[in-house]
Image: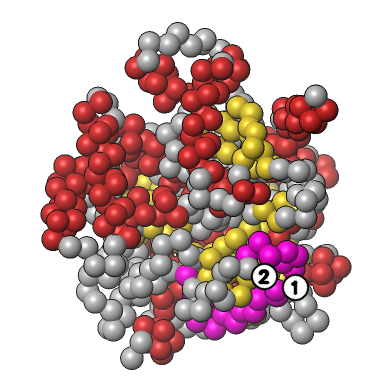
Amino acid sequence: MSWREAEREYEDDVIGETTLGRLFEDGAERHANRPAQMYKGGVYERTLTPDVLPEPAAGEWATITYGEMRDAVKKLATGFRELGVATGDRVGIFAATRMEWAQTDFALLSAGAVITTVYPGSSPSKVEYLLGDSGAEAVVVENQELLERVLEVEDELDLEFVASFDELSGYDDRDDVYELADVYELGADAYDPDAYQEWIDEPDLDDLASLIYTSGTTGKPKGVQLTHRNFRSNVNQVRKRVAPRPDKDPDVPSIDEETRVVSFLPLAHVFERTAGHFLLFGSGSCVAYAESPDTLQEDFAAVGPTGGTSVPRVYEKIYDAIREQASESSVKERIFEWAVDVGVEYQKADSPGAVLEAKRKIADKLVFSTVREALGGNIEMLISGGGSLSKELGYLYHAMGLPIYEGYGLTETSPVVTTNPPEAPEIGTIGPPIVDMEIEIDESVVTDDAFADDPGEVGELVVKGPNVSQGYWNKPEATERAFTEDGWFRTGDIVHLRPDGYLEFRERAKQILVLSTGKNVAPAPIEDAFAASQVVEQAMVVGDGRKFVSAVLVPNFEHLADWADENDYDLPEDPEAICADDRVRNYVQVEVDRINDPFETHETIKKFRLVPEEFTEENDLLTPTMKKKRRTISDRFADRIEEMYAETEAEAEA
């Protein structure tokens, strides 16, 4: 039996047709004495600790079992019902990813609520829109700072109450503001096990479970309607692919009750909500919550996870940190680069011979084993989603014994559509579709022969399946545009369906650059080629409607400082001046030429400008899931972009 047939036929206790509250309850019942959550002390002013859950010392980690987590969820669910939450009520969660987010999510779902997620970086006006558009009747915030953002716009909302994970001060005179411990105490006093079981099963599978809003980079955010069936189906579909099925070799990594992960992506986003939350708690896995994305290496080392979910930008930054630590001297740097080259060659070889095998073992002993230990020493599989992963970066991680399995999905598909099977990964692809996911390729959207050499089909991916949203909240026109007449969802993404059934991501259809020459250029593969660069930290390709492709590049300033020291250059201290330095520009030009080499002539970067500002969520150049806000970046650096093309016109006239 092939792995495809095996996963389709596979069934276990995790797979089922239940509400999300029942998914957690059943998982907690099966794994009552196993570790469920790990959390770090000294990070928050929690209200559930130390009276309800243990409080670890600052910098230390505490672990609670499924039984303890289940008790917290039950009491919180009852407390929310005591505050008036009823089946179908919309309630917002406005917080960063942490232990209480997960507990509150399951508590509200078990109480019958529909969750509206709000990213912690949202401004008061964004909070007003998200809570107002969804008709939220209450909101749970992380702390006093986020509470104050809500209260700044409360006159425009219709909230029955606000609750906070962390301690509050100055609100004793308000009877509609609570700490999470208050909600727990209300629930502990009123808890009725029979009533709780009824609430869990009260929603219909086709009832809403959550409204997750799109990023809104092309207009007002749209609330994607996701039902219990949508999420539950996607858990089933992914479980069939990553479970410890009996047909798998024992060495093939899987997700089960032995899995331990570090969670840090926003739970407000659908990727972490399904892959790092619903799937894991249904499977009996243990989830440890990172202090922040900036402490990942420290947290990985302390927790010793077997896996994790992330977006490509984080994997790029982790690799940069690994390379920087391994390059503390010129000798170590040469050894690291040699080991990486050997590892990649080994990964790409169909049948590595004895010499290459011997080199790989030496590389592993000298470099890769140390890298793995620095990340806790237990990594079996890493999942990448939320954007395209550089093929080179994929080879690098696999070479180090840290395999990344890339997948693809959207908010509207709950989110997983495809993912690489651990037993048969194909680096550089987003894998084949998951079970019960129907796909078609609309080739009519590709307007030139840019992908003519790809064997198979290239075009817009359209999908159908039980995990696909019914549409957008209160936006019937947008819903109608998103679906074909016969009910297929238009993803808006250009993909290549290979003859072997694996898909390769090409580009968002709306981000394809159409040059004035008529040539189509996909920016993503060009930008991804910089992912493992020491010289360039970030890249954004431009050129729509222009004669040629250009790029806005953020240099790696730390590497430039080392390079300047090695060459006895005295660079200016100001980042803007560094970007304008001719020596730096010439050095970066060599890297751009290297990146250009494998691309077609019309795809190569003809001009570039260095900019001193990294693309981040804080400066509004990245979304909360670390995707580039292309329009915002273009606006921010419009003068430099125009300058590049004006130079060419002037040169032509001369």
Q: Which residue is mark 1?
A: 444
For the residue labelled by badge 1, is the local secondary structure a helix, a strand or a loop? helix
Identify the amino acid type marked 1. Answer: Ser
**Residue 459 has which mark?**
2
Give the farthest residue toward the front.
654
User: What residue do we see at 17% from left, 62% from top?
Assistant: 353
* Contact between labelled residues 2 and 1, with CB atoms less than 8 Å apart: yes
Q: Quadrant of the C terminus?
A: top right
**Residue 345 has which mark?**
none
Q: Position of residue 265 (x, y in %)?
A: 50, 50
Residue 434 lies in the magenta stretch:
yes
User: What residue do we see at 58% from left, 20% from top?
Assistant: 579
445 lies left or right of 364: right
User: What residue do we see at 33% from left, 60% from top?
Assistant: 348
Give the farthest residue toward the right.
477
431 lies left or right of 269: left
Is residue 56 visible in this depiction of the protein? Answer: no
Residue in front for this viewpoint, 30 or 591: 591
Graded by Cα atoms within 10 Å as few (under 14), some (14 to 19) or many (20 or more), the crowding at tag 2 reads many
Image: 376 above or below 242: above
585 lies left or right of 518: left
Magenta-drawn stretch, dominant element (helix, strand or loop): loop
Residue in front for this viewpoint, 538 or 487: 538
Q: Which residues are magenta?
A: 431-451
User: What residue do we see at 77% from left, 78% from top?
Assistant: 484
Q: Position of residue 96 (x, y in %)?
A: 54, 45
